[in-house]
Amino acid sequence: MKKIEKILIANRGEISVRIQRTCRELGIKTVAIFSEQDKSAFHVQYAEESFALGGTALADTYLNQDKIIEITKKSGADAIHPGYGFLSENSEFARKCVENDIIYIGPDPDTIDLMGLKTESRKLMEKAGVPVVPGSIPLSSIEDVKTEAKRIGFPIIIKASAGGGGKGMRLVNVFEELEPAFDSCRREAQNSFGNPEVYMEKYITNIHHIEFQVIADHYGNVKHLYERDCSIQRRHQKIIEECPSTILTDELREEMGEIAILATKACNYKNAGTIEFILDDTGNFYFLEMNTRLQVEHPITEMITGLDLVAKQIKIAQGESIEDLVINRRGAAIECRIYAEDPENNFMPSPGKLEVYTIPAGFGVRNDTGVYSGYTIPMEYDPMISKLIVYAEDRARAIEKMQRALGEIHVLGIKTNISYLRKIILTDNFKEGKVNTQFIEEHEEELSRRPIGYGKNAIAAAAILKYEDMMGNLPCSKNGKGSAWKMNARREGVNL
């Protein structure tokens, strides 16, 4: 253990910027890396040093372990923070860091191995007394799949053993769907994770996706930072997260927190991680998986606890103990993921130049982003523009604040999911806390309706007014007409 002086962030975009900001507060120097597509990215401009990875393909850039290690040594950085995605749960990369005397800000390589394969982690959790969903061992043939499906019973879900992020998953309701689902799941698992191994679990309906943030030091101390409800998902991808969960009683929260700590200790975990559960309407919960990294949605935990998780990660990696850490929960927080995608065209990515991008502000509003006006969002990466996070004294006020904040994001040049998120937040069931992982499907018709007046004329009017504002020509300040047009366009769901 030693004091960290300089950190290379082996990532890009908003998470690289977010880590760098904490480093600046701690007096730690930062190093950014970038692909050819990212040479003008904000995370590159924000860092004190930046190095080109010398390529465009992922294998040559953000997944190029040897190149990243080489740059780390060249820059004089003594630690690497992997962020999330890319190499963040790659045990081989973590092991290379250790072998090269570079501090890896995350768990031990052996722990990543153990918890990275879902089938192995299931075995470990069962042995530790953690409840798990009825499921199978790894499946290598369609005959095995058919046998296990008969034993478990439909509906079942086939999953990639090395999967995550909603990839490598297939829901199967009837016997005839098994073989094509098995084949396509294996292909996606191989393409996404380099491992075609899959297994199956009983698919439990009307569930809530509840995860507990945990942190653990090098001295056996483990604590949880309460839960996050991640039930609002589209195609198994989280789009809105909140805490606290509306479904948990104090008793159930305490029980699940204790099980999360038990699971963390069972794998000898160190640093920050997440224990994910599924919870049914009867109060039964089951271990789903452990994410051995920082989560996309970690900011809402920071908002309700007042703790900087990245700072904790760094200090734990330096050898700091959390034995005396006091964790208090207060208020409510919600996060919306803002994507460059077109909800009216099957949520296809919408890469391109951000002609205008303004962000919301105000008390209790946080916007984690890695883009800016004039930046071109590349098609090669995840189309996330930002994570919008709000905090308030209670959930009702947090919803009101999120509605206001979403209305203040102005985007021109690309399509976004902002109006779609606003419609979710405005549904009666969301306001009442009646959410589960089928929420999007159950409200599909309601969410797919266009707002009244949403069309080319409204969009054109909004664009013209935005241009006039940018040029300093402000007719709205003279006669009020422009302001009225803007207010009307916003009511109609147009992003000004």
Image (cartoon, helix red, strand yellow):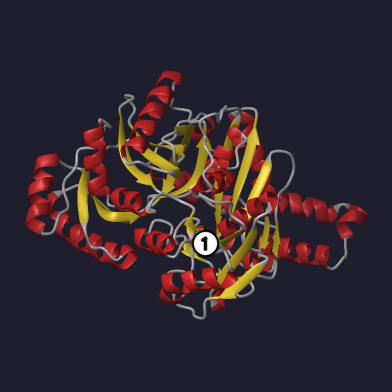
Q: 388 or 310, which is in the foreground?
A: 310
- The reply to whether residue 203 is in sight is no
Residue 437, percent from left and from top: 38, 41
Determine the image quadrant of residue 140: bottom left
Q: Residues within 10 Å of mark 1 (few under 14, many from 20)?
A: many
Q: Is residue 376 above or below residue 457?
A: below
Q: Look at 63% across and 40% down and name the residue there.
A: 390
Q: 72 or 391, which is in the foreground?
A: 72
Residue 290, percent from left and from top: 36, 44
Give the residue pinned by disc 1.
341
Residue 35, percent from left and from top: 53, 75
- Give the residue furthest to the bottom: 54
- The reply to whether residue 181 is in sight is yes
- Give the residue furthest to the front: 2
Label 1 sits on a secondary structure element that is strand
Q: Look at 62% across and 52% down and name the residue there.
A: 368
- Give the residue furthest to the top: 251
Q: Is residue 69 above or below residue 246?
A: below
Left or right: 308 in relation to 162: right
Residue 482, percent from left and from top: 82, 56
Q: Is residue 88 above or below residue 241?
A: below
Left or right: 409 in relation to 150: right
Quadrant (top left, top right, bottom left, bottom right) of the C terminus: bottom right
Name the amino acid, label 1: Glu
Count of residue discs = 1
Determine the image quadrant of residue 89: bottom left
Q: Look at 66% across and 64% down and name the residue there.
A: 47
